[in-house]
Image: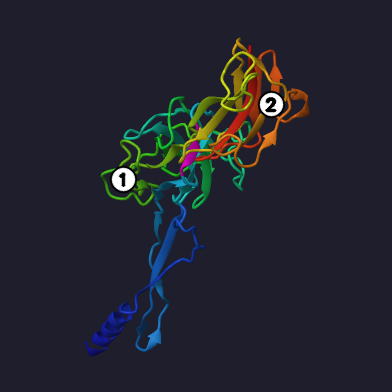
Amino acid sequence: MKPSNTRIGLALAGLLTVGVMPQAFAAGPASGTLSGTTVSNTASVAYSVGGTAQTAVSSNASTFKVDRLVNVTVAQSGGATSVAPGSTAQVITFTVTNNTNSAQDFALTAANLTGDNFDGTITGVYVESSASPNGYQAGTDTATYIDELAPDATVTVYVVANMPSGIVTGNLANVSLQATAYQNTDGTGAYVATAGSLASSGAAVQTNTGSADNTAYTDTVFGDLAGTASGDAAKDGKHSATSTYSVSTAALTVSKSSSVISDPFNGTTNPKAIPGAVVEYCLVVSNASGGAAASSVVLTDVMPTQTTYSAASMKSGTGATCNSGTVTSLTDSSADGDGASYTSGTTTVSIGTASIAAGSSVWAVFRVTVK
């Protein structure tokens, strides 16, 4: 009986050498091993009998499929977009990153949010067509959903909207962009790439909810955070972020005054506005502080019927006081390109190239003779 006991002891000792021999796999993306990957390994038992090593015994292979962890991050990019009242095709920029361990389609939805000053009219959501984003280009960036975004890849998305008139500097409009994961499956839960179209089977769903993991099946689990859009909760297969349209506009005021320069009887000494007197009109255009520069400013003044224009009397300059600072003499002809003209009883002074910055003023003067 003793030899038998000895052999049993050796066998038990051999069992203590049991080890797991994992199969080697290539490194996956930062988001983890690709979903649908089959992971398989075996164990073996090495032992000796009577001091003689015996043939190792291998176990059956244990196999499971890596499940899909759907996770997406939407982020605002580039800060708020400055807009003017009535402007069209104004762009807010976002990025969408696929943190899923598989390629993924995403549907895109933009929405106006509450708690701000106004709503723009959203005209579209478009995906940047280039791997190197160069800003929204109508006619080039035309895709309205994200198609087969690779694991850990990021794409730029543009929300385009028109602004209403009547908004003022400091008004804000908040807009959210939401990306929702869509999927095609092969019947076992594995993602099936279908390039060129948004997956037809709808938003991604957990394929084995409420039960234990099926090792032969590719389950889907949501790992996204809560977003800013209404109803965007954590772990719902979507994510959203918010950006802002910020109004910055010019607020122009124009003031006009007149002074008598001379009359036929008093000359320039205490002249009065009698027939034959020369009167100078002073026009000052001011742009309020805190807004945007005003460009292509055009001053137009129709002569009173009781007066006649004094030829070559137009001048302009910067500042809030007429005839101060650097004075520029203007001609009466529109042909010379100085932006000033007199035609059929109307004086026009264009300040197109020298825009009026916020907090600045420009002036123009011209003279008439009282009939």
Q: Is residue 163 above or below residue 2?
A: above
What residue is shown at x 58% (from left), y 23% (from top)?
Answer: 271
Question: Mark number for residue 313?
Answer: 2
User: Colour scheme of this structure image?
Assistant: rainbow
Q: Secondary structure at mark 1?
A: loop
Query: Which residue position is annotated with label 1?
Result: 234
Q: Which mark is residue 63?
A: none
> Is residue 268 depicted above or below 186 in this figure?
above
> Which is in the foreground here, disc 2 or disc 1?
2
For this view, does 108 lie left or right of residue 281?
left
Amino acid on which the number 2 mark rests in the picture: Ser
- Image quarter where the N terminus lies is bottom left
Percent position of residue 191, x then y: 46, 43
Q: Residue furthest right?
A: 335
Pick the front one: 105 or 109: 109
Task: Give the amino acid at mark 1.
Answer: Ala
Among the two numbered marks 2 and 1 on one chain, the one whose residue lies closer to the N terminus: 1
Q: Front-most of 178 and 291? A: 291
Q: Give me the residue at 59% from left, 13% from top.
A: 304
Residue in front for this viewpoint, 362 or 60: 362
The C terminus - image quarter: top right
